[in-house]
Structures are given as structure tokens and as C-alpha cells.
Amino acid sequence: MSRQGRGEKYSILFTMFIFAIIVALVFNLVSLNKDRFITKEPTRIYFADNMSAAHLKIIANFNKIYAGSIEIIPVDLPFSKFTTNERKELLARSLRSGSSRIDIFAVDQIWVPRFAKWGEPLAKYFMKTDLSRILPQALTTCYHENMLIGIPLYIDIGVLYYRKDLLDKNVAGKLKASISWEELIELGKNRNLQNPYYLYQGDSYEGLVCNYLEILGSMGGSLYRDGKLTINTEEGRRSAQFMLDLIEKYGFSPPQVASFNERESYFFALKNDAPFFRGWSSFLKDMPVNSDDSVKVKNLGVAYLPHFGRHSPVTVFGGWNLMISKYSTKKPEAYCFLEYVVSEEAQKILFETSGYLPILSSIYDDPEIRASHPYINYLEEMIKSGIHRPMLRNYTKISDILSFYLNKVLKKEISVEEALRQTEETIESDQLFLR
């Protein structure tokens, strides 16, 4: 896409974003006008995120608790309309303008270093809060330069989904214990592959980088080691080549994966009866599916992502954190909502209603939760195999460049060697990068 076309696209999306804020504002001004002679005006806090059923339930509960005092107004940025990258640019554009329209905003945990300059430091608000209750894997992503700049909403992990109705029971047992890529490949060779065998996210965006890092980690590699980026390495080249081999050499993945994000890969996997696909742990409840596929969803199992040989399985941490805009004029009230979000009540709602993994260790030990959702024990173990993407200020630029060239590999537009060489050179040049 040309620079002009990309600018026009984000201008349209930004207009949609502002319109969503205005709609929320007008709706509440109308409500205020009707009630101005009846009750005192509550402090209205505007909160931008993908508004799942769990989000709306938490907001409703909070508004009931603080009725007449504080009211959270949701500004919906649904994943169905905005990709992760688009949300990032929309929020950045709004905050860059110094606007106070948004008080609380959600960020992918890896955006924290980039958005820190627009966030309110939170340590002074959480001085009396026991942050040790929060999983360290989630809390560590909320710090930038030793400053608490966000608070985790939920955590996510990459997992292997498999169709129990399409596999032998002994295969399911192997999957639970963590299957190797070598075993999964042999299993695929012995199947009559009329349908896709394994699906992943290969479009030019952050999801592709997560897939790449999980494969890289599962063969002992790393993107960042000893304070340095390590991109054009033997493991890096093997990882990129393997992602291409899943399409070209083994025929396990269709060429369309090069254009898939999460939603598209999930829908394609269900529609075409793929026995395996990579996804986020929140998919089972967070993703609306049509009635024909709802039965198939009930047959999905969750397992560790495959690993190579003697190496251990690796999953990349995902998840979203909440930040208070430094431009907000209602910071104490915004803090009250963040404090409620990390309560057991709110975290249970996130998990039970929309399947988001809780950030409180106590939820995983809750007898009622363990009894009603026994798979949470397994997911808790999987969290231990998680790795973080590098928490660097320029990570989003690094990711944009890496995903751009990896996507070219999957489309067979460039060789693996050339892709990683150009990735390194482009990052090191420190020049403006436009897709």
C-alpha cells in the first residue's frame, strides 16, 4: 500500500474512532440533560478497548457500585473492525494530539514502552495495593524504565488447538504431554490430506511475529539475547524456512495463511475441518462463530504448541494492559476503575464470561473455578513455558519490519536469507519504514 493510501486508510479509521467517542459522549449528554434536575452529575470516564461481554459486565458492575459518583463510558474498538496494528495507530494518533477525550485505554502489553510517554505513572495510586497478587508474567509488562505505567487486564498465551473428533484418542494423549514437530509432521504424512492440516497466522502484522517467535523458541533460538537483537541467525533462518515449508514442502498449510490474521485463520480452520491450528487461549469464548461451526468448537482441545527434538515447547505471552492517559482530567476516578479491574470479582468475570486468562494467582487456586473449569490447571502450567517479546521502545517498528519481510517469504516473493538480511539492515538503518 502506498504512503498516501495508508494515510487515507488511517484517516478513515481515525474518523471512525472519533465518531465512536462522540456517539458515547452525545448519548451521555442526552442522559445528563434528562436527569440534571434529579441527581448530581457523576464523573464520566471514557474507556477505549474491544468491548467483550466480560468488559460490559465489569463496567455495569462498577457503575452500579459507584452509582451517582463515577460512570465508565465504553468506547468500543472491536477486533472485528480494527486489527491490532490499526488500534495501535488510532490510539497513538489520538494521544499524540494531546486530547483528553479518552481517560483509560487498553494496550497490547508489548506497546507499553511506546505508549509510556502518554501514560500516567501509577505507583502513587497503587501504594496500598498488594501487587504481588498479580502474576509476575503479567505485571512485568506494565513497567517501563522501572516505572509502573499500566495495570494488566488479562494475559493470553499461544496454544495448539486440535479437533478431538478428527484425531485418534492416543494422539490427543501425546498432544497433552507436548508433541514434537517431528511427530506432528509424521502424523500428517500418514493422513489423506484433503483438508488443511495445520493453520497459523501469516499476514504482515504482530500475529505473524508471535508465530515466528514460538517456532524460533521451540528450536532454542531467541530474537533478543544479551541486550542485542539477534535476527539473521541460523535458528532464525530455520524458523522462517519451516514456516514456508509448512506451505510448500509438506502441504500442511494453504497459501492463504499468508493473508490470515487470528479471526480469519480460526474461521478457515473450522470451516475446512483442519485438525490443528495455532491460536490464543481466549479463542474458545471470545470468538463468535456461526451456528454451523459451534458444534465443531465443542470438539476443540487445547495443548502445548509443538517443539523441536530435545527442546521444550514455547508460547508467546499476549494480553492487554490498561493505562490512564496523562491528559485525563479525571485521574483519581480512572484509578478507581483500574483498582476494580484487578479485583477477584472482575477477574472471575473476565475468565468465566469471555475466557480471558486471569492475572491474579488466587483465581487459579479457587476451588470453584478449578471444579467448573478444570482446564485452567493445564493453562496455568502452560503459562510457565511462556516467553515475552522484547520490551523495547522501538519494538513496534522492529515487529513491523520483521513481519513485512517474513510475509514476503510466505508469499515466495523473497528468499529467507534475503528477508532476514533486509530486516536487520532496515532496523539498523534507523530510517522511516513504510510498508
Image: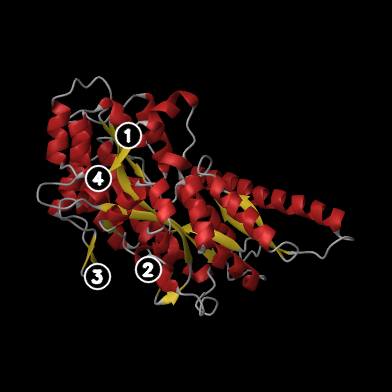
Q: Where is residue 250 in the image (x, y as percent from the top left)?
A: 17, 30
Q: What is the distance, in whole Å, between disc 1 and disc 4 at their CAs?
A: 18 Å
Residue type at mark 2: give it.
Thr
Residue 183 at what x, y percent from top left?
Answer: 13, 37
Secondary structure under the numbered disc 2 in the rendered image: helix
Q: Distance between the residues labelled 2 and 1?
A: 32 Å
Task: Using the image as rendered, state which of residue 74 and residue 239 is in the foreground.
Answer: 74
Q: Which of marks 3 and 2 is nearer the N terminus?
A: 2
Q: Nearer the viewer, residue 142 or 238?
A: 142
Of the residues tagged 2 and 1, which is closer to the observer? 2
Check contact, mark 3 vs mark 1: CB within 8 A. no
Q: Nearer the viewer, residue 219 or 232?
A: 219
**Distance from the alpha carbon under mark 2 to that under mark 4:** 23 Å
Q: Distance between the residues labelled 3 and 2?
A: 17 Å
Residue type, numbered disc 3: Gly
* Tag of residue 227: 3
Q: Quadrant of the N terminus?
A: top left
Q: How far apart are marks 3 and 1 (CA)?
A: 32 Å
- Inspect this view and state whether residue 13 appears: yes
Q: Which amino acid does label 4 sit on?
A: Leu
Q: Name the residue under label 1.
A: 257
User: What residue is rendered at 17% in x and 48% in y?
Assistant: 237
Lower position in the chain sequence, tag 2 or tag 4 = 2
Q: Mark 2 points at which residue?
A: 140
Q: Identify the element where label 1 is drawn.
A: helix
Q: Mark 2 and mark 3 in contact (Cβ < 8 Å)?
A: no
In the image, residue 406 lies at what x, y percent?
28, 45
- In front: label 1 or label 4: 4
Is mark 2 in CB contact (under 8 Å) with mark 4? no
Q: Name the residue under label 4.
A: 305
Q: How far apart are marks 3 and 4 (CA)?
A: 27 Å
